[in-house]
Image (spheres, coloured by chain):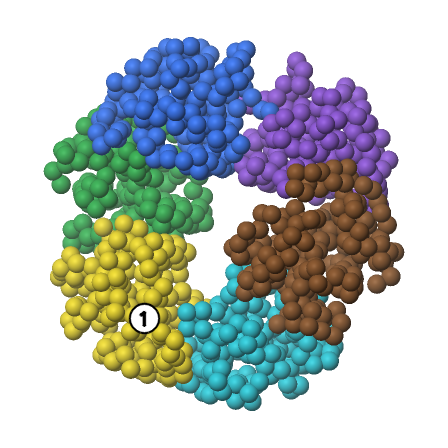
Chain colours: A blue, B purple, C brown, D cyan, E green, F yellow
């Protein structure tokens, strides 16, 4: 029942156990598409793997260390967005996301990031939000660019996909520069 | 960032650690008013006690066993509503709530219950929702009555308040009879 | 080695891991009989399920929150009786029990309840003991009636058995009225 | 409510949280007497220390690894007896005990050991029971001697009391030689 | 007793509970010097804080997720070096370190890093090692430079020191380029 | 990377998860040889059993309660040596070990014990080290004899091997008598 409305018909909900079937079904359907840039896809074999991910995300949420939210578009589950473990000492957090193939091109992830960034700065009082994208993953990198993030560096060979190491682009946004 | 809007300006949010100060401050301010019908008030001495309550509620939420939400009215925290541990075997749950003195009389708890009951029946697929009220607590009992609950019985001397045992009214609503 | 003698040849023992085989064997043998009124029977498939029940009961006992005891009649295991999580704040507890088909009619559960109720009032200093019985389960309801409990109410459709919801009778006994 | 009657008026009960005050009071009263041979007495400062001991004993009991029981004589708590962690691989266990000063000389510990040894051999199917006594602690060593244990060896300087190392006598009884 | 000798008289040892006093004493002595670039120093008030750090590091080690080692020079404890949580999916790890003021300038941290990097690549089969240094912390940045790391980027305002945000330099070394 | 060098080419390393395959392979290869005197061999069926042993040893290490180390001879894993749970109250600890068949006769275990005993007395400040050997296990008993331990007693039928109970020799060494 707890949601974060992004625009009419589009909202985020904390992932709970009862969403596992829906989430796994989409990962499984879009497996070929998603695995191109997401290292965890090949390790997700069954709904139980998705359930483990949800449970550990809820545990993280419960200990004040970030969360994983599902994205629902017109009532259809279409992707996940969330934050990694929060670095409270330096007031930083990293956002990660994925979206189904058919939901691309509608600005969905951009809207979702916008909500999370505003939440991070205003409600959590954090100072820096990072987004990491595999070099070459244009769709993913378009999100921080569109939101005004600065490219801070390229971590060489920091992403392992199907046995090949890829560079990782690191984008950052600090609170004073956030336009919302 | 996750909310359940009840009406414009009124919403529920899962209680998180960072709300502890706000919640405790209200309990402390309305201590005399709240302790009349709530046995836990006298055991809530410091913000740490509230933090413990929030943490155990988040743990409960993370294990798919109910939640505690704060009620915010025009941006002001004004009460708590939530569910006890869910009885999945029999598909039952009990709702509990409290509201600050000054927020009484605006139908806030009734709206909040309505949202939770609909959630329980439609999203959690439960069958029965209970509400327990101390006999004599008219304000509290008005909520289930207004929502069409049936009085199912009176548990004799089941509520201990300041050394005196009070009867407890048990109200119930089953899914087929819920008008929403 | 720790027992609670009810009468010569009849005693209660805290259930321990080593009893799992004996307990499961009886559940399995009387499966048809027991499932009529006990919602957990259909979810008890193997001795491991019984072991889980015993372990969680011992954990409950270790945290001062009730227990599960086996009933032995002439050295034969014949049923289980115990308490749910204790409500220390209101000093209430609920007793639950089941008995094998062939051990019916000998007053065994009544004796066992008597011992637990006395323990609850005198050793644990509780104030109220509840017993819940499915409406229509005459054998079960005979126990609190025989012990002088008062029928406090009927929780409509609070018990789910094989897809059908049944009413639940709630009986209560407060300490000042207990004759022992 | 669970007891092991040793003789009329004398019984063992699993130690539970609610016994902490009673147990600590006796340790505190007989502190000078008990610390002569028991290394843990000086580390028991408050009732909370006793509570910790009881909780860890209950956890041990819950994981099928031995227990701690109180001894009640004519309704008065007078000592503790229990087993260490059970060595299931070799089917061995060690018994430990202490008794208040004024309860000495009545054969209480001997009776209690007898019950535990019989339990270990018959209910737990163990093969060997050990009892360790500080060299020079005649009262303690009298117990295994009276019960027919064999002195198996002397562990040199294995017991530390107030900064001085004492030898430890190891007594053993194997199942085939137990007369009960 | 387990060490990693860097050169005669200089070695690393896994930090254990018994080292807490020694570690805290040095942090406390060099507090002014260390807090300039280390955000955790101001949160380390007592030996108990150091003990918590050591315990959580041992837990991390036990779950195969990195470690914290002390550096001993001529038998004197002089600093800490270790790894953050390992990213097994992408085979990456980050090294962190600090050294007492008087131990500077002897190549100690460089030697220690060399040992850990070789361990990461050869024993753990990782692919990438990162080192993060506050922009302006020349001493710290000299280490990865001397070891041939590449500067991969600058994370803007990612380090919070006494209320001021500093940029963070990220240096990286991949396995194929490591000369040992 | 943390080692305890016994002599050139021979060292001890804390067992970590990544060693499980190597350890299990040796147990499995020497199964017939090892099971003669080690009760746990028959319960070690797969690499997962070895992994469980390693994990519980690391947990013990992390809580300051002893450790399990592998022995590497010329880079080949050849056995395990470690300590049981430490008795801090009496400052005692027991050492246990096993070695592959082909590594016998080179004084390996004697050297390893020497290092652990010195560590126990000098770094952990313990007072007594015990070694237990099955009566008749000449190879194992030769180790404490060679190191100057005293035979302190024989625990009758304290070791269960393939259904037969064997006596257990207890050897002890106190700190003042240790020559190193």
- Residue drawn at x 86%, y 50% as measured from the top left: C150
Closer to the camera, D8 or C84?
Answer: C84
Is F120 placed left or right of D75 in the picture? left
Which residue in the rendered view is the most extreme toward the front? Answer: C32
Q: Is residue C56 above or below residue A126?
A: below
Closer to the camera, C77 or A120?
Answer: C77
Is F124 placed left or right of B139 in the picture? left
Q: Is residue F155 above or below residue F94?
A: below
Q: Residue F71, image x and y in percent?
A: 22, 61
To which quarter of the image does residue D47 belong?
Answer: bottom right
Q: Is residue B25 visible?
A: no
Q: Is residue E158 above or below residue F100?
A: above
Crowdedness of circle 1 by 10 Å Cα count: few (<14), some, many (20+)?
Answer: some
- Residue drawn at x 76%, y 72% as measured from the top left: C7
Q: Is residue F47 above or below residue D2?
A: above
Q: Residue D4, image x and y in percent?
A: 66, 73
Closer to the camera, B96 or A23?
Answer: A23
Q: Residue E16, image x and y in percent?
A: 35, 54
The image shows a total of numbered marks equal to 1
The residue singled out by tag 1 in the image is F38
- Residue drawn at x 26%, y 53% as measured from the top left: F21
Q: Is residue D152 visible?
A: yes
Is A25 placed left or right of D144 in the picture? left
- Residue drawn at x 60%, y 38% as measured from the top left: B65
Secondary structure under the numbered disc 1 in the rendered image: loop
Q: Residue B54, image x and y in percent?
A: 60, 36
To which quarter of the image does residue A1 belong?
Answer: top right
To which quarter of the image does residue A90 belong?
Answer: top left
């Amino acid at each position: 029942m707890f949601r974060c409305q992004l625009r009419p018909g589009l909202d985020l909900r904390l992932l709970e156990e009862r969403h596992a079937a829906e989430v796994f079904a989409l990962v499984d359907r879009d497996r070929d598409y998603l695995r191109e840039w997401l290292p965890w896809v090949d390790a997700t074999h069954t709904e139980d793997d998705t359930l483990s991910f949800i449970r550990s995300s809820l545990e993280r949420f419960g200990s004040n260390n970030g969360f994983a939210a599902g994205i629902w578009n017109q009532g259809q589950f279409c992707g996940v967005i969330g934050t990694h473990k929060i670095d409270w000492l330096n007031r930083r957090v990293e956002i990660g996301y994925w979206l189904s193939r058919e939901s691309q091109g509608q600005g969905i992830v951009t809207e979702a990031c916008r909500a999370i960034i505003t939440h991070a700065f205003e409600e959590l009082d954090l100072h820096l939000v990072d987004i990491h994208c595999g070099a070459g993953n244009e769709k993913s990198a378009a999100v921080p660019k569109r939101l005004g993030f600065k490219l801070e560096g390229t971590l060489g060979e920091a992403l392992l996909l199907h046995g090949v190491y890829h560079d990782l682009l690191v984008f950052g946004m600090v609170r004073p520069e956030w336009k919302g």
